[in-house]
Image: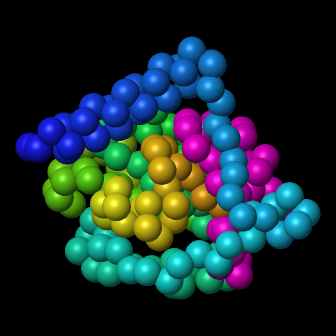
Amino acid sequence: MTLKQAAFVLIAGLILAGAYVGSSLGWVSPTSGGFTDGAGSLALPAPDVEFRTVEGSEASLAEYRGQVVLLNIWGTWCPPCIREIPHLVEVQDVIEPLGGTVIGLAVDSGSSEDIHAFWADRLELEPAYPLWMGTNREARRHFDAFGLPNTLIIDRDGVIRERFLGLVTRDLLLSELEPYL
């Protein structure tokens, strides 16, 4: 590892650790931000990119047009992400009958077997929503996702309407999803 790479890893680790400690202690709350439509809401077309699913097929957000999508960008190595997943499972149970779905984009989290084992062994849950696999680099490039967890609300027309950085709860998500369902 070069000195430049080591410095980058150290700085990224300190940022993630600070975000984790801050959110754990209540110093930092989930933030939203991005391009707006002039009324304060985000209005950014979701990219039409494909990701591999943990089942081994390819999937894209375009396949979900007509549904409200809660795209959660997370990692098996991210403590706030792990704490957030049970909330997302509960949100999935509520929004699925209303034409919505949660999609979990696991970044830099290993193979599909690793992700399934994580859900079974660490969470002691069966995946309740589609799980995709990608990289941090892809998440940054396609969704401007700097930091994890990073959660996007995408409306039925494929437009990103809300963005949250940091751990979000079931109640917050359901409140924010309501206008789009």
Image position, residue 25 (x, y; %): 57, 15
Residue 77 lies, in percent from the top left, at 29, 38
Q: Quadrant of the C terminus?
A: bottom right
Residue positioned most to the left: 1
Image-based side of 121 in relation to 140, left or right: left
Image point 63% across, 19% down: which residue? 27
Quarter of the figure with residue 118:
top left
- Residue sitting at 63 percent across and 47 percent down? 164
Residue 163 in magenta stretch: yes
On screen, 66 above or below 109?
below
Residue at 74% x, 71% y is 43
Residue range in magenta is 154-181
Q: For residue 180, which quarter of the picture?
A: bottom right
Q: Is residue 171 magenta?
A: yes
Q: Position of residue 32 (x, y in %)?
A: 69, 47
> Which residue sits furthest top?
25
Residue that protrudes farthest toward the right in the picture: 39
Q: Classify 19 as above or below 157.
A: above
Quadrant of the frame with the N terminus: top left
Which residue is the extreme one toward the front? 3
